[in-house]
């Protein structure tokens, strides 16, 4: 392997915690990845990885080298781009993550046009509600709703999403249409948590200039956005979701907005990516495309 390939192999071992998974992600034999890392260690004169039968972990030197090597590879890509002729196609692989609903409704339907414009690109798209580890799992960028939790990542806020309260016509026919906060005492909430076993926050609403939470009953708790929508469609209770994700259901009448005056806090939609001095051009282009694609569906960013 050349130096760039060896650096990529080392980075994947660190990110995935093992040689086997790193080799699979790169499409290389495990032995080739192992030899590449050994050669790096010999060239640098230091141990980059702690190896045990159960896991592989970066040493202190390895962690420092990992961070620097990401910048080095990004710099190499930038240098190559400096001498590309105008109109030269972007190439390489992008690994991105976003919620399953966002991928299904907005991104995947438009992705053929993006790839037609950049036929040398390959995209690995993870569609999950799980909070992935951007650095460890090797993602170029992730698209997430809500306030970013990891201050080590760069956050590019695309806008905010209005939240609406919805229920199915069948549910409202059985339980009645709530008209006020007090009416919610006789209703069920479909509870959403990131990890099953956590306690649901309850129904969020604005009162007196601040957002509050009302504990509500409900027989169903889910940890997936698609299941959350499906539960509401099945008549299991009220949900609080971004308007853009249920606009079609509201137009078709399969969901109905309720107590619109009890608004939850708008949810920011943010692109997150790892700190690096230079982003590869393919990552910048993809993020700009996402921002343009979603702009018509978003309100201005929260202040």
Image (cartoon, rainbow, N blue to C red):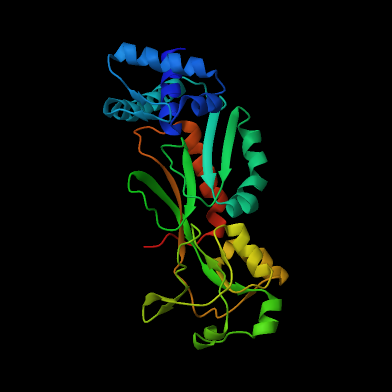
The one of 122 and 64 positioned closer to us in this rendering: 64
User: What is the x, y in percent for residue 256?
Assistant: 65, 75
User: What is the x, y in percent for residue 253?
Assistant: 71, 72
In the rendered view, tell whether residue 44 sits above or below residue 135.
Answer: above
The one of 144 and 160 positioned closer to us in this rendering: 144
The one of 105 and 78 positioned closer to us in this rendering: 105
Q: Residue furthest front?
A: 53
Residue at (33, 30) in percent of width and height: 67
In the rendered view, tell whether residue 239 sits above or below residue 60.
Answer: below
Residue at (60, 27) in percent of width and height: 120
Relative horizontal placement of residue 195, taking residue 69 as reference (left or right): right
Residue 77: quadrant of the picture: top left
User: Residue 91: in sight, yes or no?
Assistant: no
User: What is the x, y in percent for residue 164?
Assistant: 55, 71
Relative horizontal placement of residue 244, taking residue 130 as reference (left or right): right
Relative horizontal placement of residue 230, taking residue 214 as reference (left or right): right
The one of 228 and 99 positioned closer to us in this rendering: 228
Quarter that holds the C terminus = bottom left
Residue at (52, 36) in percent of width and height: 95
Residue 13: quadrant of the picture: top left
User: What is the x, y in percent for residue 186?
Assistant: 56, 85
Residue at (44, 13) in percent of width and height: 35
Residue 71: quadrant of the picture: top left
User: Residue 251: in sight, yes or no?
Assistant: yes
In the rendered view, tell whether residue 238 sits above or below residue 136.
Answer: below
Q: How many numbered marks appear?
A: 0
């Amino acid at each position: 392997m050349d130096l760039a390939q060896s650096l990529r192999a080392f980075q994947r071992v660190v990110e995935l915690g093992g040689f086997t998974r790193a080799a699979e992600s790169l499409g290389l034999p495990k032995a080739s990845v192992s030899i590449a890392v050994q050669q790096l260690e010999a060239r640098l004169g230091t141990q980059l990885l702690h190896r045990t039968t159960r896991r592989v972990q970066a040493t202190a030197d390895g962690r420092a080298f990992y961070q620097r090597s990401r910048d080095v590879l990004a710099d190499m890509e930038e240098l190559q781009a400096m001498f590309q002729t105008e109109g030269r196609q972007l190439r390489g692989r992008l690994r991105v993550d976003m919620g399953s609903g966002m991928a299904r409704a907005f991104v995947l339907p438009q992705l053929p046009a993006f790839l037609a414009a950049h036929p040398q690109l390959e995209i690995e798209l993870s569609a999950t509600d799980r909070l992935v580890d951007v650095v460890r799992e090797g993602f170029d960028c992730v698209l997430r709703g809500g306030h970013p939790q990891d201050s080590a990542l760069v956050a590019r806020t695309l806008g905010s999403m209005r939240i609406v309260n919805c229920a199915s016509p069948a549910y409202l026919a059985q339980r009645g249409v709530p008209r006020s906060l007090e009416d919610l005492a006789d209703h069920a909430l479909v509870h959403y948590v990131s990890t099953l076993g956590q306690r649901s926050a309850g129904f969020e609403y604005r009162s007196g200039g601040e957002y509050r939470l009302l504990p509500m009953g409900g027989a169903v708790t889910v940890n997936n956005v698609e299941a959350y929508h499906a539960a509401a469609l099945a008549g299991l209770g009220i949900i609080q979701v971004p308007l853009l994700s249920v606009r079609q259901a509201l137009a078709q009448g399969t969901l109905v907005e309720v107590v619109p005056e009890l608004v939850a806090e708008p949810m920011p939609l943010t692109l997150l990516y790892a700190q690096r001095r230079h982003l590869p051009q393919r990552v910048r282009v993809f993020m700009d495309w996402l921002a343009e694609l979603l702009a018509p569906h978003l309100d201005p960013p929260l202040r």
